[in-house]
Structure formats: structure tokens, C-alpha cells
Image (cartoon, rainbow, N blue to C red):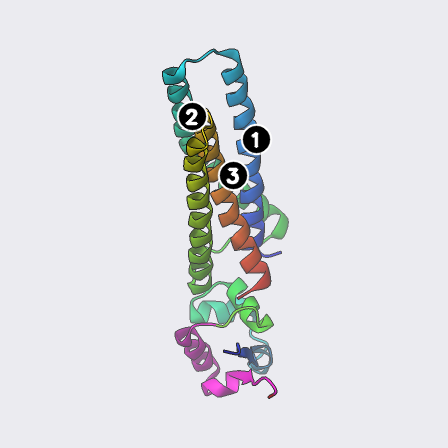
């Protein structure tokens, strides 16, 4: 496995783990409190807004740790720049990632039309965000492995 | 439209140039070593500019470095 393949695999698994742990905390807090509809909106909005900087910080820490481990185990320095292939793969991954998010966004709006709880829309939005991140990471992994 | 598969003689050309390493070639053309690996394996078709850069490093015409296999009719 090349540096990029390992990096995107670690990123994907890291995002998944972070989201699972975060969901567990959020659901615990949600079950502990009783919310009226306004408080419920505030709770889920805060849950999404906190997840964004948390996932960015986790990604930075994960990248630093991964680079340290990669240098120690593979005895090779990580590439210091992105070349044309990296940029092309990045663009394709971003496109797929956007498709995944738009699909999740539309489904979350659809849930409101089908008279689902407003909190369901927020949960679906959160899932769409993580799903789009995973689609991006695994698209990159796939393209680095298979080529194009 | 049939997708043409682009192949290359980079491995042989590197061998002929005092066993130039993939890293050395990558540095000369300004890409990462992983991209050279992908090109050699046929997993990535480089841009026209990069293809010319690689040919220039070997001092060979483009068609001596890269070639296509036409699908049988």
C-alpha cells in the first residue's frame, strides 16, 4: 500500500470511529434530557456545529500521528506536495462526496415531508455529513488502488 | 467510444539510464514517486505535459516512451 492509500484508509476509519463515539455521547445526552421542540432544534443544531470543528481537529491530529508512524514503519518521508494525479483524484473524490451530501440533504428534507420528527432531519443531516466524508475518503482509496 | 489503454517503456528506459530510481525520475519531472509507480503499472495515464517531461528526461521522442494498444476489430 502506498502512502496515499494508507492515509485515506486511516482517514476513513478515523472519521467513522470519531462519528460513532460522538453519536454515542450525543444520544446519551439526548436521552438524559427532555426537550420541547425549540430546545430540541437547539440541541441538534449544537450537536452538528460541535461535530464540524471536532472532526477538523481530529483529522489534523490523526494526520500528524499517521505521518509519524509512517516515517517510523516505512522509513520513507511522506510526499511534501500534491502532483497532478493527487489533484485529479482529490477532485473526483470531492465530486462524489458532494453527491453523497446532496443525497443526504434531500433525504433529510424528504423526511419532513413524510411527517417525521424534526430531530430525524438533523440526525439525517449529521449522517449525510459523515457519509460524504467517508465517500470522499474511500473514493480516493479506490482510485489510488485501482487507477484511472 | 472504445477506451485506449496507454502503456509505456519507462521501466526499461530507467534501466538503460544507469538504473535510474523511480524517486530520481519523480524529482526530475516534478511528481511524487507514487505517481511514477502508477504510470509504470499502467494505472494512470499522465497529462500530455507530464508525458513530454518524462520523454525529455530520457531524451526520447514521446512515442518511444508511451504507446497504445489498439483494440482488435
Asked if labels 3 and 1 share a chain, the reply is yes
Chain holding disc 1: A
Task: Tell me where residue A144 appears, x and y as whole percent.
Answer: 55, 59
Instruction: From the image, tell me which residue sits under label 3.
Output: A62
Crowding near the residue tagged with mark 1, few <14, some 14–19, many ≥20 C-alpha atoms within 10 Å: few
**Up/down of A43 relative to A146, above or below:** above
Asked if labels 2 and 1 share a chain, the reply is yes
- Work out whether mark 3 precedes mark 2 in sequence or the reverse, and give the earlier one: 3
- Work out whether mark 3 precedes mark 1 in sequence or the reverse, and give the earlier one: 1
Crowding near the residue tagged with mark 3, few <14, some 14–19, many ≥20 C-alpha atoms within 10 Å: some
User: As rendered, which of A73 and B34 lies closer to the eye?
Assistant: B34
Instruction: From the image, tell me which residue sits under label 2.
Output: A118
**Up/down of A20 relative to A26, above or below:** below
Q: Which mark is residue A20?
A: 1
Q: Are marks 3 and 2 in contact (CB under 8 Å)?
A: no
Task: Tell me where residue A66 appears, x and y as whole percent.
Answer: 55, 43
In which image quadrant can residue A39 be found?
top left
Q: Work out how far the residue at label 3 is from the one at label 1, CA to CA, in angstroms.
A: 16 Å
Q: Work out how far the residue at label 2 is from the one at label 1, CA to CA, in angstroms.
A: 21 Å
User: As rendered, which of A116 and A95 lies closer to the eye?
Assistant: A116
Start and end of the magenta stretch?
A: B46-72
Query: What is the secondary structure assignment of the residue under circle 1?
Result: helix
Amino acid at each position: 500500500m502506498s502512502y496515499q492509500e494508507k492515509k485515506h484508509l486511516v482517514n476513513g476509519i478515523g472519521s467513522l470511529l470519531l462519528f460513532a463515539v460522538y453519536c454515542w455521547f450525543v444520544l446519551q445526552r439526548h436521552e438524559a434530557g427532555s426537550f420541547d421542540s425549540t430546545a430540541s432544534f437547539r440541541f441538534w443544531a449544537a450537536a452538528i456545529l460541535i461535530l464540524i470543528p471536532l472532526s477538523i481537529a481530529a483529522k489534523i491530529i490523526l494526520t500528524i500521528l499517521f505521518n509519524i508512524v509512517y516515517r517510523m514503519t516505512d522509513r520513507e518521508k511522506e510526499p511534501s506536495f500534491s502532483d497532478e494525479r493527487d489533484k485529479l483524484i482529490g477532485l473526483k473524490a470531492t465530486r462524489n462526496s458532494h453527491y453523497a451530501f446532496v443525497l443526504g440533504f434531500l433525504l433529510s428534507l424528504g423526511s419532513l415531508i413524510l411527517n417525521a420528527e424534526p430531530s430525524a432531519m438533523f440526525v439525517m443531516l449529521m449522517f449525510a455529513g459523515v457519509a460524504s466524508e467517508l465517500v470522499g475518503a474511500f473514493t480516493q482509496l479506490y482510485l489510488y488502488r485501482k487507477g484511472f | 467510444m472504445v477506451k485506449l489503454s496507454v502503456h509505456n517503456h519507462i521501466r526499461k528506459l530507467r534501466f538503460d539510464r544507469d538504473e535510474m530510481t523511480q524517486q530520481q525520475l519523480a524529482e526530475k519531472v516534478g511528481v511524487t514517486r507514487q505517481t511514477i509507480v502508477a504510470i509504470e503499472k499502467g494505472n494512470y495515464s499522465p497529462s500530455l505535459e507530464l508525458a513530454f517531461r518524462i520523454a525529455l528526461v530520457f531524451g526520447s521522442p514521446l512515442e518511444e516512451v508511451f504507446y497504445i494498444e489498439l483494440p482488435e476489430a
